[in-house]
Image: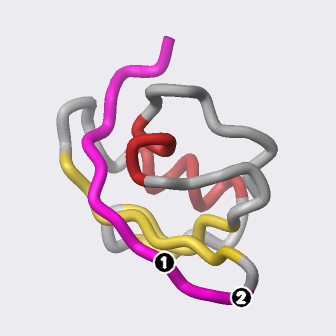
Amino acid sequence: LLGGVREGSPADQAGLRQGDIIVSLGGMEVADLYGLTDALRAHEPGDTVVIEWLRDGERMRAETTLTARN
């Protein structure tokens, strides 16, 4: 469950909002924070990945380009 989305971040550019639940990133299933961390570590800044999430029970997806975290 996303607690928030930073303006201009890859999540923001993909269209994610506070309260969305990320279920997949770059083809890797995400069940919890550890799964999200593993999926992010499997990629480098500059990689373009497909991210999938749930919002109000609807599965959504978008492509986004990862950046280095500040």
Residue displayed at 55% across by 27% down: 7
- Decide which of 22, 38 is in the foreground and name it: 22
The three-letter code of the residue at mark 1 reads Met
* Vertical comparison of 8 with 3: above or below: above
Q: Residues within 10 Å of mark 1 (few under 14, many from 20)?
A: some
Task: Check residue 57 in the rendering and tell me which mark sits there, or answer none.
Answer: 2
Residue ID at (50%, 11%): 70
Q: Which residues are magenta?
A: 57-70
Could you tell me how far apart the alpha carbons at marks 1 and 2 are, in whole angstroms? 9 Å
| Rendered-image quadrant of the N terminus | bottom right
Q: Label 1 belongs to which residue?
A: 60
Specify whether 35 is left or right of 25.
right
Total marks drawn? 2
Q: Position of residue 57 (x, y in %)?
A: 71, 88
Looking at the image, residue 33 lies above or below residue 51 = above
Q: Quick one: which residue is furthest to the top in this view?
A: 70
